[in-house]
Every structure is written in structure tokens, then in C-alpha cells.
Image (tube, rainbow, N blue to C red):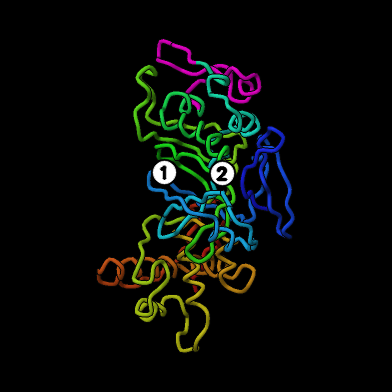
Amino acid sequence: MWLHSIERKDGRLEGKVIHSDGDISWVDASSLWQLQMPESGKSKLRLTTNLDDWQASDSTEYLALSGMQYHLRDDSHEIYVARHLGLRLLIPALVLTRALFMPNAIFFNHLYRPSSLDQLVAPVLQATGLVCAPLHRDLRRRIGAAASGPTRVQWMYCFPSAREAFASVYANALRRAIRLALPKLVGDAVLTGTLHGRVFVASAMSLHRLEPNEHAFSWAGEQPTQFILPSADRSGTQLNPVLKKSELIEGPNGWRLADSEWLRLNHIIRANPADGPNDDRAIVDAILIKLATGMGWRSANGMVEGATRVSSFYQNLRRSGRWEDFEAALLCLRQGKKLPPLRPRQDAVLFPHNPRIRLRPRKTL
């Protein structure tokens, strides 16, 4: 399903939802947070992103990649385009709104009404500075009556662009649009979705740290430079470990191997290069993309036919020590350095990203 626009019906704002079969239904604006995006992938991508660098776009590319084909005009759901490690990230406005204003069940009741944050929280002057106390009973129960540290509502209340983002949701809804004014901040985020080539189509987002790119209101006094966000769904503590190599760099063919790179390095991967053509190179390309972007193994395996061929191939290379040799040689090539000599490895290399995985050491003959 897809949230097409916002309409006023019988004095209330409702979302116009298009289903995959073309049927139309209406959802009360306060319940829009419960809608699922048409892209149902489960790959997770961790990143630190600056919202000042995001660009706005329409929904055409997002819907095409999601397999959602319909021909209704005036689609008013804005898509935000971000970039990370050579990938283009497509993030719907509803996904970002849900990530910023949590808990959704409480905030969405106010986002689509002519209300303000002053109806939800109140400033309290303490010896350490100004903090925000929740007025709404359920909000007070969810985040704590007396927060022990900076919280999401304190950032919303004390920073100009955060307040503007809150108010812009309703202002845009009156114009039938699903969009918001992007707040000025750098955030640590986790995106869930599917990777299509070099485009990541996001279906969900969670924020775990905010660093405002602006000063707080003068009346707010001294405010923290970053806010660690308590997540209502605790997704930040339940995510599986993600294997990612920050030291990898792109080459002439992006994360994938160039012909010249494969020609010089395939002997490390292939036990017998004279065996003839196979799909080892495609598997190595998938491994490099997975390591560089932090995408899930499910998506990496999907890049090559076979249920677990990419992850199994990588595990075998790690067990033999060949992947470390290959990675070091590839990095030297991409940095313009001399290739290091190959050294036989006698011990298995454990997976540092997941201590539950144990590899058997190689037997010495």
C-alpha cells in the first residue's frame, strides 16, 4: 500500500491509501503511523547522516523500485534522497516523520491537528538548566516523568528547526502533501529496506542519536550538543550484529571489481584459475558491497543465485585466510601501492562482528 495524499473529509484529515491492486481506502491522519510501506525488505543499513545534505524528490523512482505501479496523478508523498558510501537512499516523508516523532501513537494525534508542543511538554528550570517535563499522561509514562538525561522532546522543544518540523507536518497536510521541513541535525540512524543495485529503498527508520546543527532558543539556555534517544520499540538494542568494513574504499568500478583488479587478484580467490569461467567474481562483488555498505546478508545472497552462496563463500574464504589476503591486496591496488606478498595462514580468523560464530582452525599436515 502507498500513502498518496492527505484530504479533508467531514472536517477531519484523512490519508488516501492506494493498494497494490489499485483499490483506494481512507485512514484517519492520527493512525497514519501504522501504515506499512510497499517496500518490505529486511536489510538494515547503519549510517550517520546530515539532513542538511538531503534533497527532496517525488515518489516515481521509489514506487517503481518497490513494484508499486499505478497511474493516479497528484501524488503528494515527498521522498528524501540521501547519499551514503556510494549509495542513493530513498526515504519517504512518512518514514522520517515516524522516526522523528516517537512514540507515534501519541505524537500523530497532535501532528495532524492545529496544536503545539506546549500541549505535550512544559519547560522546567533546574539547577543544571532547562529541561522538559511531559504533560501528556501516556507520554509521561512512556519516557519517564523525570528524565535522567536529554530526551527527544527536549530537542523538539528547545531547537528552532525541530519546532518548525513539528508544525510543518500539519501545514503541509492542509495542502494535501505528506512532507515536512527538515530539521537541522546530524543523526545516527538505522534504515530498513531493500538494496536495488546502488539504490537503497527504505521502508522504516529509527534514530538513536541527534546532534543539532543550530543553537537552541536563547530562552532555553545551555542545551546538550547531542541527544541520545530512547527508542519506544527498542530497535537499537535488538538489531543483529552487522559486518561492515570502514577501511574499504571505492575503485574505478565503485565497490565492484574492475576488470584490471580481478585480473591481478583472482588467483587469491580461486584455488585453480585455470578451471575456466565461473561466477566467483560476481560473488566477490556482492561481498564487497555487503562489507562496504553494511547491508544484510539476505540482500547480499540475493545478488547471486543460490540461497546462501555469498555468505558461505565469504565464510570459506575467511576460514582459509584468503579473504584477508585479498582485502589487503585490493586496498593496496586502490591506494596505488605495491601489492603485499602472500603469506600462508595457519590459524582460523574468528568473526569479530559476531562472537557466537566459531570457525574451526585448519589442520596442520
Mark sitting on residue 309 = none
- Residue 76 lies left or right of residue 288; in this view the side is right
Q: Secondary structure at mark 2?
A: loop
x and y, in percent, of residue 135 in the image: 59, 17
What residue is disc 1 on? 51
Residue in the foreground of this view, choosing between 161 and 282: 161
x and y, in percent, of residue 263 in the image: 37, 81
Q: Secondary structure at mark 1?
A: helix
Q: Quadrant of residue 338?
A: bottom left
Please tell me whether residue 249 is drawn above or below residue 82 in the rendered image.
below
Determine the residue positioned at 68% across, 41% down. 34
Please tell me whether residue 71 is drawn above or below residue 45 in the rendered image.
below
Q: Is residue 278 magenta?
A: no
Determine the residue positioned at 62% across, 34% down. 104
Q: Residue furthest front?
A: 10
Determine the residue positioned at 35% across, 72% down. 342
Q: CA distance from mark 1 to mark 2?
A: 17 Å
Please tell me whether residue 172 is drawn above or below residue 358 in the rendered image.
above
x and y, in percent, of residue 37 in the image: 63, 51
The magenta region covers: 123-151
What residue is disc 2 on? 178
